[in-house]
Image (cartoon, helix red, strand yellow):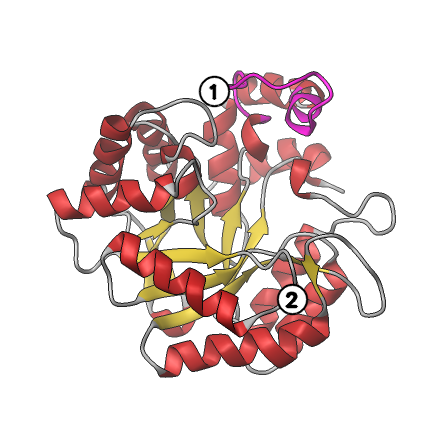
Amino acid sequence: MELRDFGRLGQISALTLGGGGIAGVWGGTDRGEAVATVHAALDAGITMLDLAPSYGADFESERTVAEALRLRPAPDVMITSKVRLPDGASAARIRGSLQASLTRLNRDHLDVLLLHTQFRRTGTTLHETVSPEEYRDEIVPTFEALRDEGLIRGWGITAVGDPAPIIEAFHHTPRPDTAQIVVNPLNQNGDLWIHGDTVRPDNAALISAATAAGVAVTAIRVVAAGALTSSLDREVPPTHPAAVDFARAEPYRKLAAELGETPAALAHRYALTVPGVSTVILGVKNRTELTECLAAEARGPLSPEALTALAPFTTP
């Protein structure tokens, strides 16, 4: 598997195994298959596992990886997890969440700890967000202290939502080591978008700003929560963002067939081709889906002709 630059943290595989799929967020799976998927990912050369306490019931993503690594230790694999701050910034909450993750994973440090809460603009109110001031004055100093203490090797942010405060965070020093940004051919943010019509998403601007600031980009929502696959693998009401996006993506699925690709494989190859992306996080829940993504990565970047065919979809 291709290795790419991951900033101060060294190199990383072009694909990262995400924790949502193996925790049953994106359709049903079971612990045995999830553990086998972790092992298959490591065998294929994947060097990072991206987890979160909120992925799955009872911290399932972290518990699954703990079991997988207990059965087959992989001391060199990088592990990330996240902290949510729905009630505002709190050093104690960050430290408590990290310590709980370390206990579940049976580790003494994480390679990356990510803020898993969106930003709001200064002077505005929005449920379950943090302000730029909270980020600068409480979150960044706490993350930096945790790094100095050896409890994390690096830290980052989930860079979804209103572009303005995110780009402001990229300009603030100390900067995050990495940012998770939505990257998919239709620029679909789905249920991650909580800002209504007050502002518009701009994922391309986020990638550009992160790259310019030396912040490594990890691509998320590559298949737009399942909208860019052959069929949704979970029951959602017709008004759910994933169902709406899936219906809108029918012309994309036709193009994928014309290009000789499955919709999911085309989406992953697209994300791997986007300049500035260090690694693409997979939402797979089993070895079959993992195999499809591994094969897509092995086929390499999309051709200029394929990118031209995708242009009407990727243009905002």
Q: Which residues are magenta?
A: 227-246
CA–CA distance in space, label 2 to label 1: 33 Å
Secondary structure mostly taken by the magenta-highlighted segment of the chain: loop
Residue nearest the viewer, comparing 93 with 124? 93
- Residue at 52%, 24% (x, y): give it: 263
Question: Which circle's residue, 2 or 1, is located before the other in the chain?
Answer: 2
Above/below status of 153 relative to 241:
below
Instruction: Tell me the residue that label 1 is attached to.
Output: 260
- Residue 113 is situated, as x and y percent measured from the top left of the image, at 43, 63
Residue nearest the viewer, comparing 214 with 192? 192
Element class at badge 2 = helix
Amino acid of disc 2? Ala
- Residue at 47%, 38% (x, y): give it: 269
Above/below status of 149 relative to 200:
below
Q: Residues within 10 Å of mark 2 (few under 14, many from 20)?
A: some
Side of 218 relative to 32 (left or right)? right
Amino acid of disc 1? Gly
Mark 1 and mark 2 in contact (Cβ < 8 Å)?
Answer: no
Q: Quadrant of residue 57?
A: top left
Instruction: Tell me the residue that label 2 is attached to.
Output: 209
**244 within the magenta span:** yes
Give the total of numbered labels.
Answer: 2
Can see residue 10?
Answer: yes
